[in-house]
Amino acid sequence: MMSARHFLSMMDYTPDELGSVIRRGIELKDLRNRGVLFEPLRGRVLAMIFEKSSTRTRVSFEAGMIQLGGQAIFLSPRDTQLGRGEPIADGARVMSRMVDAVMIRTFAHSNLTEFAAHSRVPVINGLSDDLHPCQLLADMQTFLEHRGSIKGKTVAWVGDGNNMCNSYIEAAIQFDFQLRIACPQGYEPDPRFLALAGNRVTLTRDPREAVKDAHLISTDVWTSMGQEEEAAKRLALFKPFQVTRAMLDLAADDVLFMHCLPAHRGEEISQDLLDDVRSVAWDQAENRLHAQKALLEFLVAPAYQPA
């Protein structure tokens, strides 16, 4: 019964499977742009559990399900409380009898793994404190659209070694690129992910060293949800890690800049960076929709056998 495929991490799939989901995302984007109605998930329901607030994750999954002919149920932090009052395992057993897939945006990654272990339908990580794999699907789709294969390329991550950074490490393994991470002392990514990546990943304290000749530069806010009390300290510490146009000039001529958004202009990026022609942040944000539609189709559609 518990044989559903989940998407909790980039490591859950083979590189070939990830590549086919991303290429499918590009096809679904083309269908939408041409106004072609494509509804393989008619009659299917996605439950979306949010413990953390969200703009892009909610809109992209909800719109995606509707465009694929299905529906999404939004459960706010007030509507469900993972593990508070009702054990996570019980919630998973009940909910997975009523819906066709569950997307969870949560704090502790263990909430996801526990829910998935007791769910009879696919569970998707919409972000946890450890990882943000759906964002990486969108990022990889965006790079492929603009520059072709990322295999063998150099990617620079500048800033906090957070969940996004951990997912970039997983992507480096799965998509076969070199990743340079520039972060302040004490803000390195999780050692578990670094160990997994071996010599694919290098750590540096100098952002200029990280971005030299890079084909892709990515960053994220310096203070993530739940870290607000550290904001002032982080602001001072991360100041040298602001990504600017001058920093992009040190990279490869065809460098792309990405940011998973929301962006704090004047903090992790200079005021004008998202307006630079090398920034593809808006395409990247849109691709959350298309990549996740491909993921939903991959996870949910095969299980559906109409009468």
Image (cartoon, helix red, strand yellow):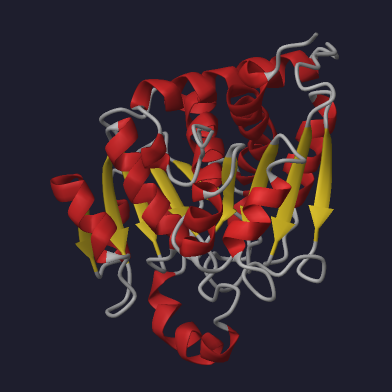
Residue 155 to residue 263: above or below: above
Residue 190 to residue 116: above or below: below
Give me the residue at 28% from left, 43% from top.
213
Image check: 9 left or right of 104? left
Give me the residue at 70% from left, 21% from top.
29
Image x and y of residue 25, in percent? 61, 23
| Placement of the C terminus among the 4 image quadrants | top right
Q: Residue furthest left?
A: 199
Image check: 187 left or right of 121? left
Image x and y of residue 181, in percent? 30, 58
User: In this rendering, does residue 67 appear at all?
Assistant: yes
Q: Nearer the viewer, residue 66 or 255?
A: 66
User: In this rendering, does residue 279 appear at all?
Assistant: no
Identify the image quadrant of residue 61.
Answer: top right
Q: How many marks?
A: 0
Residue 85 to residue 35: above or below: below
Image x and y of residue 271, in percent? 63, 65
Identify the image quadrant of residue 225.
Answer: bottom right
Image x and y of residue 138, in percent? 56, 37
Give me the residue at 71% from left, 34% from top.
100
Q: Nearer the viewer, residue 3 or 15?
A: 3
Image check: 108 left or right of 56? left
| Placement of the N terminus among the 4 image quadrants | top right
Image check: 174 left or right of 239? left
Residue 43 to residue 280: above or below: above
Give me the residue at 64% from left, 39% from top.
288
Q: Nearer the viewer, residue 23 or 46?
A: 46
